[in-house]
Image (cartoon, coloured by chain):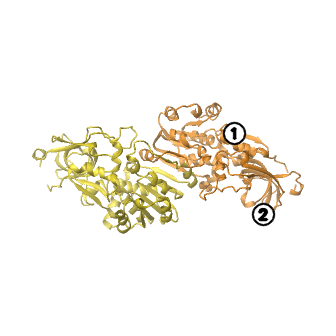
Chain colours: A yellow, B orange
Amino acid sequence: MIHSDIKEQNQEIVLAERPLGVPTEDTFQTNDIDMPTPKDNEVLIKNIYVSVDPGMRGFMDKGDDDAAGAKYELNQPITSRSVAQIVDSNDEHFAVGDIVHGRFAWQKYQTVSVEDIEKVDPDLAPISTAVSMLGVPGLAAYFGMLKIGQPKKGETVVVSGAAGSVGSIASQIAKITGGRVIGIAGSAKKINYLENELGLDKGIDYKQTDDMQVAIKEACPDGVDVFFDNVGGELFDAVFANMNRHGRVAICGQIAEYNADNPPTGPRPMHKLIKKSARMEGFVVFDFSAEFDEAKKQIAEWYNDGQIIYKENLIEGFENIPSAFIGLFKGENIGKQMVKVGDVKNC
Amino acid sequence: MIHSDIKEQNQEIVLAERPLGVPTEDTFQTNDIDMPTPKDNEVLIKNIYVSVDPGMRGFMDKGDDDAAGAKYELNQPITSRSVAQIVDSNDEHFAVGDIVHGRFAWQKYQTVSVEDIEKVDPDLAPISTAVSMLGVPGLAAYFGMLKIGQPKKGETVVVSGAAGSVGSIASQIAKITGGRVIGIAGSAKKINYLENELGLDKGIDYKQTDDMQVAIKEACPDGVDVFFDNVGGELFDAVFANMNRHGRVAICGQIAEYNADNPPTGPRPMHKLIKKSARMEGFVVFDFSAEFDEAKKQIAEWYNDGQIIYKENLIEGFENIPSAFIGLFKGENIGKQMVKVGDVKNC
């Protein structure tokens, strides 16, 4: 198949306006676009799986040049980590039919430079995991827990957003290292998932808990040694109040803040950091890019051994990418949110 | 001389009431007390130099069991790091005339267990430095800068409270490691001290600066790699806004908070920690007690080489200990605040 054989109308989804607070359908606009032709060292790809992540919300704000990733431009297509199949190639190293991943535009078909794609090994794990368990979320869990949190055997580890794509893997890695792991999530369904499927020591439903600080204290009678935080805000405060001496806080995400129009305020943590000789550290996975291959291999091994359970929440259809993204902020999903926008063709 | 030869009236200064906000003279009360007699393995000591430190303010609040140090009890003598001379000994390892240091009560004379004292080597540096440059403040500067801040040659280092007992040594250690060092202090006299005596690259008088965030940006065109914070509050925010990727914040003291009745609030730093892959870490010197001897030797060597300049602000008289302590919160002093309460006797 070459690109001229494709009969489907190509489409893109662009950033129509910068959202204030939680994005809505008006944040996005779908346009019909032409089918592009790959130049030298480019390939034409068809999107198969598109990942939507809470952290993308920050890229929708007006840029201040100091974000870890790129900002989205108005009227330009949104980009996100995606898995695609090559349908036409102008590079000898990539063949039609190859599965690749990268940060792709929300377009059904697009040309990309071969420098911006990486091959996916379909034998390692299901190909969608290239942008989830074996992609940024899994790597964030792996490096955030092991390099920043550094749990030791027998320590108490608390993970917020524990049913999410990062938190569920971080929690399980903490269990593998021999920690006592408490997961925080926001529904009975999620708590059941944490306790009965992922095997965490306890799940706490913050939506059903009046005083989270007390709940954490009860769940962690020996205090908290490692806090892997995906949420921030008052939930952070409640866990942080229970930190042990020499505790480590890995700041992975702050979903409670992503839709805040102004920088949020809260109790200053500095005095407690001194009292407890404790540490708070932020990170992005690309800090550890030299170790990606090793980490992917380890996570896939744990997955194939059954030591890590990994779930996807799959929505079908290119036109449903915006609603899948907006749904992230409703806090209802278990596992990594993905959108399946095309089928893999055997070539 | 034995204790029965001492004709002077013994006295103590106790915590008369727990202060709200900044302590006043009413916080303290001076009482006449009896001269104690040392039991086995005790010595009778005469206070020579009493150290007063901002961090003691925290010990005056009602205890919550999670402070790094002990709380003061009402109507009991305040304790602080002090240098004393032995005037009577019931232990073979300590002789009358020996100079010792430890956390002693604000009493002219007192008995202490030999387990709670450490000999001072008068040949290393002036004996008062045993509780300052070679004591907790100097060790906090040394470990906070080298172990937490970890400045690399050519990096930009900002120190708040830079003219104080900890900050002045921390700043100079950062210079020794090859950093570009910016000190923040609160008077023209202090800025002159930083720039012209300690040799820092620049001093910023926060009291004469409308927008500290802009002032830091101008003074640090390459951003801030290491922030050694003694102050906290809005000054923290202004420096933190300028942190570089992989920046390190050593949280040493938070003098802006010590007198706050409620935990202060401020902008949450978490999002920025993620964006910058930055780290905030609190510490107390006792985290590093295994390395004290090595550190003292190194600091004394730098001092005797002239690479570290060290100043004391000396007030005379046992009765002036409270006013010396209260004066710490007026921000007027250069160097370590000490009170000389007695003279060394040659035995």
> Please, what secondary structure does the residue beneath circle 2 have?
loop
x, y percent for residue A341: 20, 52
Q: Residues within 10 Å of mark 1 (few under 14, many from 20)?
A: some
| Left or right: residue A206 compared with residue A97 | right
Q: Residues within 10 Å of mark 2 (few under 14, many from 20)?
A: some
- Residue ID for mark 2: B41
| Left or right: residue A146 compared with residue B210 | left
Residue A42 quadrant: top left
| Left or right: residue B143 compared with residue A103 | right
Badge number at residue B103: none
x, y percent for residue B323: 73, 43
Q: Nearer the viewer, residue A315 or B158?
A: A315
Q: Chain of mark 1?
A: B
Whether residue B336 is visible to the viewer of this picture, yes or no, is no
Quadrant of the snapshot with the N terminus of chain B:
bottom right
- Residue ID for mark 1: B311
Amino acid marked by disc 1 = Lys
x, y percent for residue B134: 67, 47
Question: As displayed, is residue A157 above or below residue B211?
Answer: below
Residues at marks 1 and 2 touching, judged by CB atoms closer than 8 Å? no
